[in-house]
Image (spheres, grey):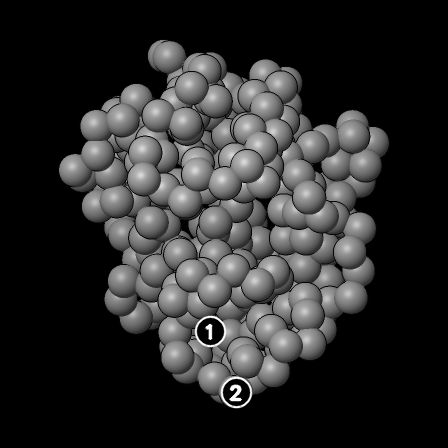
Amino acid sequence: MSNIKIVRTWWGNDSDKWEDIPIKPLYNNEIVYVWGDENKEELESRGYPCIAMGDNNYSGNNVYGRKLQVLDIALKHWGEVLMLDWDCLILKPLDKDFYNLLRQKETQIPLYAHYKEPMFALLEAIPDHHPILHYDETYFNLIDDLSTLESQIQHYHWVWQDALIIPNFGCVYSRNKDLGKDLLKIVEENDIKGLVEEFAMWKYANCSLEEYINEYQPDYVLGVSDEELKYQNYTISVTQKRFNKYIKNKINYKPYLEHV
């Protein structure tokens, strides 16, 4: 395996999400770009090298813009990165064959599907007993986030059957040192809200769905794992299952990573 940097991000104080973080790094080339001194201390106590991030320009509905800030800094620093969400699991050793898959395309970001009515489908998939629905603050924040998604995704998507398709930033590979900078510029110039990193990538690609698959879709990961969807029958899950089947017919699928 090459010494390509595996880049992670972390912010906030959601105690449940700490469960996604391994108790120690899986690879010696991982690095975490982190917001918050306490978060940094906890991650370093687990053995993760960390870089502190102090810029809070992206918060609230636009918090995912932080991924673009990290991508920009990491690409400038390391030149080539694999940026993974903590829920993007490594299924097997990242070996020579995996590295050869990375060589095929300069930038690789998988696709995923939203139902044509995103708010309806996402609300449907939240169990009635979930705490987010039972407290005014969390519920209204949820509705605010989904309203932003609903309005913004109408501008940034490909239509596929009854779905709206966008890039999924849970897994990003690139050796284009300007990618992060270019995506941040797109966000600022277009006042993109919500899933800013994914909408910006859609606009950056500036191509058809088929062209995106050929140019950017990786062979080693799906936007949402088949395993995650196996026993789900929500509208959004059924939509994603169909889209996964479509994508796997378009690529030479060799799963190394699983975004759950």
Q: Is residue 135 above or below residue 99?
A: above
Q: Is residue 198 above or below residue 165?
A: below
Other-residue count near label 2 (Cα within 10 Å), few / some / many at <14 / 14–19 / ≥20: few
For label 2, the residue is: 45
Q: Which mark is in front, 1 or 2?
A: 2
Q: Secondary structure at mark 2?
A: helix
For label 1, the residue is: 2
Q: Is residue 62 above or below residue 18?
A: above
**Earlier sequence position, callout 1 versus callout 2:** 1
| Percent position of residue 47, x then y | 50, 86
| The quadrant where residue 27 appears | bottom left
Q: Kindly report the distance in space between the C-alpha atoms of the residues bearing marks 1 and 2.
A: 26 Å
Q: Amino acid at mark 2?
A: Ser
**Left or right, 45 with reference to 246:** right
Which residue lies most toward the right here? Answer: 189
Which residue lies most toward the left here? Answer: 231
Residue at left 61%, top 62%? 11
Q: Amino acid at mark 1?
A: Ser
Q: Secondary structure at mark 1?
A: loop
| Percent position of residue 102, x then y | 45, 56
Which residue is nearer to you in this view: 214 or 142? 142
Q: Is residue 243 visible?
A: no
| The quadrant where residue 142 appears | top right
Other-residue count near label 1 (Cα within 10 Å), few / some / many at <14 / 14–19 / ≥20: few
